[in-house]
Amino acid sequence: MKSNHALIVGASSGIGLAVARRMKRDGFIVSGISRRTPPLDAVDSAMCCDVTEGEGLVEAIAQLKQKHGVPEVVVYSAGYPVMGKTLSVPETEARCAFEVHFWGLDRLVRTILPEMKLHGGGTILAILSIAALCPPPFEAYYAASKSAVVAYLRGLSLESGRDNVRLKWLAPGYVDTGFLERGNWFGMSIPPVHGSGVTPDQIAEAALRIIRSGQDFRIIGWKERCLALAERISPSMCKRWFELKK
């Protein structure tokens, strides 16, 4: 039997916080997992842990599941901003991007997806980035880790569809949350970055829509949709765009 339990990973700030608040307004029982405690108005329950700590993540999920049941919806919005000149990025930092974006999601999926199958299905939604489709300069490891998630979800969805477990993703561009400013920029200072003016609340609304729809993914922002189209039609067009913006 499905529940109205929504589990948000990365619920303490930025996009994850906006998604948690939106899901709660829509009537979901919302639980959050993040390194810091989310605001009380955003969640019904919360556990603090790091997604790179496998045992801690599994235990946090188990406690929230015991309290609210197997989640009907899981949104993965954990992020690690590692930016800068690629060869200036320390290997440890590059690996952290993959630990948070890819392996953290994989740990979550391995824990949740089998139980979703047993309880009639559910939806797992990953908040990714346009960088997963159109890698910009100075974000090589960030983009590579997000791109790996796209391939992972596409492959896994072919296996899980018959069990009514849907794997989806959103790809927004730059959103003014302070995420890039909090990042470690190696070999350079933070460059000016501009997106399409999309807000965390708009992404949260898009998250709710895609959860309810038959879509597998959605690109957020008019500039980002243009970039994705250019990448599909002629990758050299996308490359030229980024070269002009450097």
Image: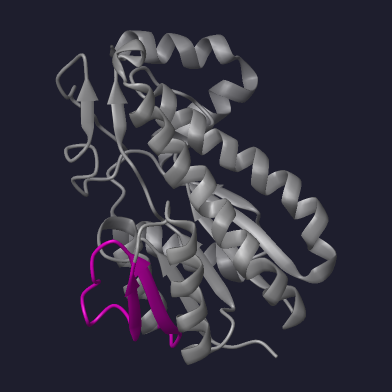
| Residue occupying the point 69% across, 63% down | 166
Q: Is residue 186 left or right of residue 172?
A: left
Q: In this view, does 36 lie to the left or right of 10?
A: left
**Which residue occupies the extreme front position in the image?**
55
Structure colour scheme: one colour
Measuring from the top left, give residue 211's x and y in whole percent.
57, 67
* Viewer-proximal residue among 34 and 208: 34
Measuring from the top left, give residue 112's x and y in whole percent.
61, 69
Quadrant where the image shows the C terminus: top left
Quadrant where the image shows the N terminus: bottom right
Q: Is residue 210 left or right of residue 13?
A: right
- Residue 94 drawn above or below residue 152: above
Q: Is residue 176 left or right of residue 127?
A: left
Residue 106 belongs to the span the image colors magenta: no
**Which residue occupies the extreme right position in the image?**
162
Measuring from the top left, give residue 142's x and y in whole percent.
41, 32
| Residue occupying the point 46% across, 42% down | 99
- Residue 22 drawn above or below residue 141: below
| Residue occupying the point 18% across, 25% down | 192
| Count of numbered tags | 0
The magenta-colored residue range is 26-48
- Residue 96 drawn above or below residue 34: above
Residue 33 belongs to the span the image colors magenta: yes
Residue 226 makes an appearance in the image: no
| Residue occupying the point 25% across, 60% down | 13
- Using the rendered view, name the quadrant where residue 241 is placed: top left
Residue 58 makes an appearance in the image: yes
Measuring from the top left, give residue 122's x and y in whole percent.
66, 73
- Using the rendered view, name the quadrant where residue 120 is placed: bottom right
* Viewer-proximal residue among 53 and 5: 53
